[in-house]
Amino acid sequence: MRATATALALLLALAGLSIGPPARGEEIPRLTFAQLADSMRANLGVTQGIKAYNGREIEIQGFIIPAGPPDLSFFLLSRVSGTGNYCCELPSGQDETVYVYTARGVSLRYDPVRVYRVRGVFEAGHQVDRSYGVSFFRVRDARVEEAVGARIFKVGETKSP
Amino acid sequence: MTPVTVVWRYLQGRFVTSVLTVVSVALGVSLVIASVLLTRGIKEAFIAGATDYNLIVGAKGSPTQLVLNVIFRMDAPTPNIPLSTYENLRSDPRVEVAVPVAMGDAYQGFRYVATTEAYFAPFSWRRHVPALLTGRLFRNEAPERPDYEAVLGADAARRTGLKPEDRFYEGEEMAAYPLRVVGVLRPAGTADDRAIFISLGSYWEMNEISRKAMIKPLTAVLVRPKRLSDLPALHRGWNVGPDLQAALPSAILLNVFNLLGLVEDVLAVVLAVVAVVVGLYLFVTMYNATLERRREIATMRALGARRATVLGIVLLESCAIAALGGLAGILGGHGVAALGGSLLAARGGPVTQGLAFSALQPVTFGAVVALGALAGLLPAVLAYRTEVAENLAPL
């Protein structure tokens, strides 16, 4: 009985690790598209403030735009849904698009009008990828899950739901 | 006599029953294996065959039909769009490459795909570049003087038997426009294997409507933007008008996968029921066998066999039946999946790999043996508790 309980606790702990907070109790900083847009400079550069997150694990929420293979090993994360709200806002551009490279084995159900929470290693700065071209913001080794009840704000509100 | 020898004798002693039980287990396991391999194979084939172009612009209608027809050569083509759509996309500064595609007739079921040489261009971002096995590509001739040259996909060439320099047409009305094979593509494992590529000029001349009405229709335009971040704007821009639509191929496939996921869920329930039925059948077989053998078990006990030995023998027999059925089922399941995959491919569906080895096989085998142990547990306990005095009484 005790062994079963221990095994169950171990399984729950392992499941929690898949999207849980990082080790040592460090809080994952959450970036917003407003911060990304503000960090862009006219000379294709980005501010030092946003570069400070380079190599660190961050969280960002947005809509998935499947721009790579249909296994979602790569996709764009955008402030505006790519296929959903025709009536609401114009599509976002380079400054509000994050290129997401998912970790191996990530499995999720795609829905164009749902908001997703992406956690992974952040990179800011102009880069050209052989397969996916020019990008300014990237998240690598990303884990993805649906951000239930979340909303994406253009400016202001940045609190986690 | 070792427990293994005893189990072997038991299996031989109830040969017909043992074989029938093994077959039942094998049928259940092969159903599981074949179902999983086929659904997984279909999904993987869709992923492998997906286009590297990020956007498809076509006539207003179903985006799923547009993607399935243009990329996977399934379903009927969507209505025509004017050539100006392609010209507008080609001159759009946000677009790196635009490739026109016109779909229509077929030869022996292999569809004609009219396009330009750009379709075969080896861009650095392409995962699959159609490559020639023999011959050459068709020429980009002047539309008013088409050469009627054709490049065949690997399957199309193999199944029609056509080779370079052969001429072919289908239907009397096309006798005036025979196509000449100038090249055959290498097998790519995509829908291109089942296509017959011709130039747009040939297509327009072969098409009676475009000939008489002096129009140059297309079915779709494949688009690759210079920057992927322009994709949403391009997608939105082409969708707001009343006549045209733009579809993200990956998004459409993901929606198809979502539907496939519902089928997988239903299948999982069916397979769980099959596992329960197989487990119950195994249990009933072992239970009856144990009841029939109570006198033999009592004799073994009287001759010095321990209760644990008796328990182990029954469990071993149950696990052996399950293991044999599991092995046969895994082999049979692969056979069924390979057969289903080839039947699906022959009907123009996605090609599946029925013989792929993964964690599925060992996990299934382990689960079947565990199911065998579970089914044999109660009969084993029954054997364990068999009283010598009661069961050795004179008959």
Image (cartoon, coloured by chain):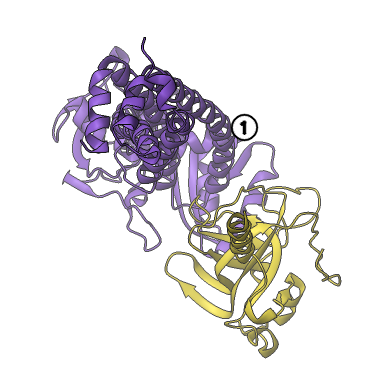
Which chain is displayed in yellow in the rendered image?
A
Relative to residue B279, is residue B4 drawn left or right? left
Residue B260 screen position, x and y as percent: 54, 35
> Picture quarter containing residue B35?
top left
Quarter of the rendering occupied by the N terminus of chain B: top left
Identify residue for label 1: B61
Structural crowding at the residue carrying mark 1, measured as other residues with C-alpha within 10 Å and reported as few (<14), some (14–19) or many (≥20): few
Q: Residue furthest right?
A: A156
Quarter of the rendering occupied by the C terminus of chain B: top left
The tint chain B carries is purple
Residue B385 lies, with reference to residue B24, above or below; the image says below
Looking at the rendered structure, the kind of residue marked 1 is Gly
Residue A132 visible within the image = yes
Question: Which chain hosts label 1?
Answer: B
Residue B241 screen position, x and y as percent: 69, 42
Secondary structure of the residue carrying numbered label 1: loop
* Residue ID at (60%, 83%): A54
Residue B195 visible within the image = no
